[in-house]
Image: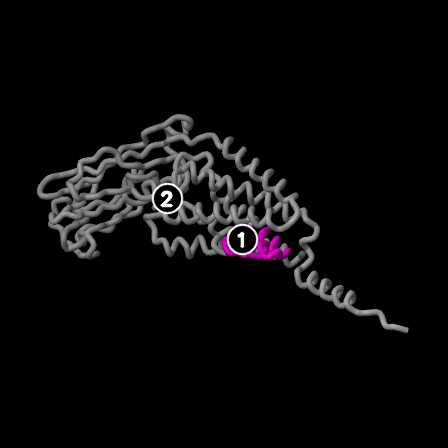
Amino acid sequence: MARQLVLVALLMLALAAPASAHDADAHTPPDRVGDLRSAMIDSSLPPGVEFRVLQNGEAVWLRNSTRTDVVVLDPDGAQRYQLGPDGAAVNAALPAEATPSGDISEDPDKSSGDATAAPRWQRISTDPAVQWHDHYAHWGDATLPSQVLADPDHEHLIRAWQVDLVSDGRTYQARGELRWVPGPSPLPWILVAVSLAIATALLGLVRGHRPPAAATAVLVAASATHGIATILGRQAENLWTVIQHEYLPIALAWLIGAAAVVLLGLNRSTGRWFAALAAVGLGAVALLQDLPVWWSSTSVVALPIDLDRALVSITAGVAAGLLFTVLRAPNITRSDAVTATQRSGSARVDGVLPQGR
């Protein structure tokens, strides 16, 4: 029993890293899940030019598939990027754009270049696409805007933003808005999670290993779907770096859950301990990291947000019910090895014939 508790503690410590990995810095919104929304609105772009907002304003992305160069202008009018048939280039004559200490609208020291100076293009890619951080497309301060603090229950336009593009002597605008959009009530999702926890706990009253095996399979499937969709939604970051820094412990919990399903399917009672470990780990991630999706209007995830809320509810509810089911069963402390030895010894005793007198 002590060994299993140590494993639970170690798994929870390992999962603490991804749960705390949402700390804000100067280039990251206060949270990847929240009520601040940055999105494009109707814009005038040349045919063959594609502009996107990534991760709710964490970065913007531009691709030029035409045979004509497109130049990206800074807010002060200086030429920053050039995209064309030869790939993407940056103007090395401009100073590197400084990271503001807070939100860009409150930072008077933003560096600027000379808009009249001749550009000095430095090739950065053979692919005619570029991604960069636009300070105006997101809220970069941990303190919410004043109008939101005064009235958080209503929608607010924080600011409109635009990126100017020049192609063939004509100026185009990629336009967007940063808005505060209040999220929904979390009550329906709380009820879903509680109902699933109760249903899973009641399912555990059925004898045999199939009910916990089925519950563990649902838990792993819901958590893995949410996790993979979150990774795919983080388009502004290197996905392998995200997986290495944040998702390896969670992937370990998925593997433990899959092992539990296999062991329980083979009628091994030790599979219950694997199920308990998976429930602790994946339940901790849902409760400590993913829960804000219930009451937030935005989430960085490659799924419809209501479906993502449902997946988080399934994970939290099934994990709680499964952990209760496993821990309440008194026979899970007996290992399969001891059980097999006892059965083998009993068979040998039963097979000895009494000696005749």
**Tag 1: amino acid:** Gly
Q: Name the magenta segment's main secondary structure.
A: helix
First of labels 1, 2 by sequence position? 1
Residue furthest out toward the right: 357
Residue 120 % position (x, y):
14, 54
Image quadrant in which you'd find residue 52: top left
Residue for point 67% across, 46% down: 328
Check disc 2 and report its element: helix, strand or loop.
Answer: loop
CB of mark 1 within 8 Å of CB of mark 2?
no
Residue 192 % position (x, y):
53, 35
**Quadrant holding the C terminus:** bottom right
Residue 190 left/right relative to 147: right
Magenta run includes residue 271? yes
Local packing at callout 2 (Cα closer than 10 Å; few below 14, some 14-19, many 20+) is some
Residue 245 % position (x, y):
43, 55
User: Which residue is under mark 2?
Assistant: 302
Magenta stretch bounds: 253-278
28, 1: nearer the viewer: 1
Residue 327 left/right relative to 58: right
Q: Which mark is residue 42?
A: none
345, 276: nearer the viewer: 345
Asked whether the viewer can see residue 311, the reply is yes
**Quadrant holding the N terminus:** bottom right
Residue 98 left/right relative to 144: left
Check disc 1 and report its element: helix, strand or loop.
Answer: helix
350 versus 253 height, above or below: below
User: Which residue is under mark 1?
Assistant: 257
Local packing at callout 1 (Cα closer than 10 Å; few below 14, some 14-19, many 20+) is many
**Tag 2: amino acid:** Ala
Residue for point 58% across, 52% down: 275
Magenta run includes residue 320? no
Image quadrant in which you'd find residue 44: top left
